[in-house]
Image (cartoon, rainbow, N blue to C red):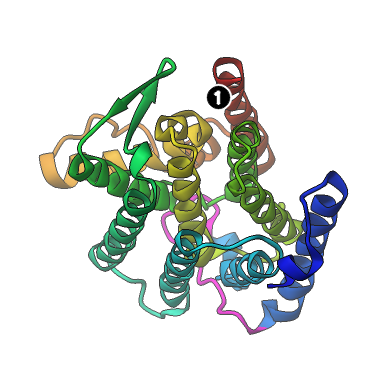
Amino acid sequence: MLYQLLKFQYTGQSLFYIILITFLITIVAIQATKNILPQDGGRAFAVNGELSKGKPRGVGIVFIICYVVMSLLYVPLNREYMIYTILLVASMLSGFLDDRSEIPWGGLKKGLIDLAIALMAAITFVNYNTEHIGLQFQNKFFSIPVVVYVILAVILFWASINVTNCSDGVDGLCGSLGVVTLLTFYCVFSKQHCEYGVYALMMIACLLGYLWFNMSPSKVLMGDAGSRALGFFIGVLALKSYNPLLYLLAAFMFILDGGLGLIKVSLIRVCKIHIMKNIRTPIHDHARKNLRWSDTQVVFRFVVIQLIASSIIFFCYF
């Protein structure tokens, strides 16, 4: 691998160059491919959904490929990470096929694909991290049965994929929240001296390259190809932090924004309960329609709230 040839030791200077190159390559790749990607048809039930009509959609396939290529070139690899990378690409491809489909995929089809990817990722983690099968709470580690841990990990992956996907509805929102969440995990990995911190930084560089085009008014949309893959990637980081409970704070705004929508739909379809009938979901649509926030206000305020949630980790964990 090029990593071994160049013998990077992750000094501040070498890491800066890796991140800068990744950022620039992502910008060039998006600029070169945006006109050949499928066009968004607009979202009938989303606030200002008509504004996205005609914009290149599925740009996630570009920045995820940039991430994969750069990580294969510049970071040390092992079998566990390679499996996660294959599953990341699978998540991205499933999202992109939905992006380019004239008829959107049904929730059952996407749910089953997410479930299969989540199950394979969970089994991979328990196979390579047998000493970390448990949960950490108040500096105490509680071991749990492997089967129970796999079930919980599958739930985490499935939830992370879907809440991240639901949050992709405002220019700059999903990417900006993703940057803060990934930066939070980078800080955790830095304390643990774990190489997954470098992976987090490289994904941040790719997201920043995407945000170069996606800030309001956006020129491109990440689509399911980007949001679903990003959600999967965040799930991997949550498990590799060896404290998956950190996900609750590190991805707080993803959970609040997209998660409430999933809960609302589930209650209506399964239990016929309408306790959130006055709340528009995802929450970013409620903020724009009911609270009259502009897109810029939604992004900035959601990021501020996420920074506050992430700061709780810093005070308690460091």
- Dominant secondary structure of the magenta stretch? loop
- In the image, taking residue 74 as reference, residue 116 lies left or right, namely left
Give the residue drawn at x 70%, y 65%.
219
In which quadrant will I find the C terminus?
A: top right
Instruction: Give the residue type at disc 1.
Output: Ala
Q: Which residue is mark 1?
A: 309
162 w.r.t. 59: above or below: above
Q: In the rendered structure, does residue 192 fall within the stretch colored magenta?
A: no
301 w.r.t. 84: above or below: above
Give the residue drawn at x 55%, y 23%.
313
Residue 293 is at least partly visible in this image:
no
Give the residue drawn at x 29%, y 45%.
155
Q: Position of residue 169 (x, y in %)?
A: 53, 52
Q: Position of residue 105 (x, y in %)?
A: 32, 71
- In the image, taking residue 42 as reference, residue 146 lies left or right, namely left
Q: Position of residue 300 (x, y in %)?
A: 67, 35
Q: Which residues are magenta?
A: 36-49
Q: Position of residue 244 (x, y in %)?
A: 41, 35
Q: In the rendered structure, does residue 38 fall within the stretch colored magenta?
A: yes
Viewer-closest of 85 and 268: 85
